[in-house]
Image: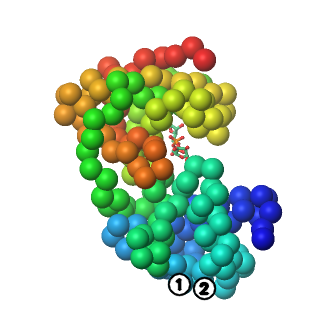
Amino acid sequence: MINEKQATHISKFLSLVLRHQPETIGIALDPNGWADVAELIEKCNKNGVQIDRETLNYIVETNAKKRFAFNDELNKIRASQGHSKAVELGYSNQKPPALLYHGTSEKSINTILENGLQKQSRQHVHLSSDIETAIKVGQRHGKPFVFQVLAEQMYRNKFQFYLSDNGVWLTDHVPVSYLKRMEV
Ligand code: HQG
């Protein structure tokens, strides 16, 4: 069985392949973001990332953020969110909690206050239902800063919200008028 460090390495590689650059190992995602499991395993191994079905199952099950999911037949796998590749994940528009949170770094505050939250290189703006997660997300970019998002109000005003299979809230854009700065 692999250790935690190896699992993290493989998980990061799978994020790269299944969200951003499937072509780096010569595979393609289908329109809904799925990759064929057998082909993924074969091509990972050919590209220097040693993995078998048991390891893949272990990563899907134990990944802290549940980033990856199998289809019902267990022969396809995809990332549940976070893509830069254009994929149709098939989540339906649903009412979010009154408030959601977005963690960013202090250096982005001013541009966000000018343009709102933009999806940048990804397919959606990513929001969390708890502040702790938002702080962790913000820490990836520098000194963390958290914006509160008036999500229910946006929903009432016809903005669409999706909940990914691993519990991340997704939307297209958050205008400044729905953002509140938080002291964390
Ligand atoms: C910022 C991780 C300037 C935004 C996390 C963020 C998440 C702006 C950065 C998921 C801006 C984009 C996504 C504007 C937004 N001006 N900066 N107008 N609008 N930004 O990594 O949300 O661990 O693409 O605040 O948990 O940080 O990979 O997005 O700082 O769920 O599974 O532009 O990735 O999931 O950065 O993270 P990212 P994110 P995983």
Element under disc 1: helix
13 in relation to 141, above or below: below
Q: Position of residue 65 (x, y in %)?
A: 58, 49
Give the residue drawn at x 26%, y 45%: 93
Q: Which residue is mark 1?
A: 39
36 in relation to 119, above or below: below
Residue nearer the viewer, 96 or 42: 96
Can residue 138 be seen in the rendering of this structure? no
Give the residue drawn at x 33%, y 33%: 96
Query: Which colouring convention does the figure follow?
Result: rainbow
Q: Is residue 70 left or right of residue 152?
A: right
Kind of residue at disc 1: Glu
Residue nearer the viewer, 15 or 167: 167
Q: Is the residue at mark 1 in contact range of ligand 1, meaning its CB lies under 8 Å from it?
A: no
Task: Kindly indicate the quadrant of the structure image that contains residue 98.
Answer: top left
Q: Position of residue 149 (x, y in %)?
A: 40, 25
Q: Quadrant of the N terminus?
A: bottom right
Task: Kindly indicate the quadrant of the structure image that contains residue 171.
Answer: top left
85 in relation to 49, above or below: above
Element under disc 2: helix
Can residue 55 be seen in the rendering of this structure? yes
Badge 1 density bin: few <14, some 14–19, many ≥20, Cα 10 Å? some
Give the residue drawn at x 45%, y 36%: 127
Residue nearer the viewer, 68 or 83: 68
Badge 2 density bin: few <14, some 14–19, many ≥20, Cα 10 Å? some
Cβ–Cβ under 8 Å for marks 1 and 2: yes
- CA distance for labels 1 and 2: 5 Å
Q: Which residue is mark 2?
A: 42
Kind of residue at disc 2: Glu
Q: Position of residue 97 (x, y in %)?
A: 36, 29
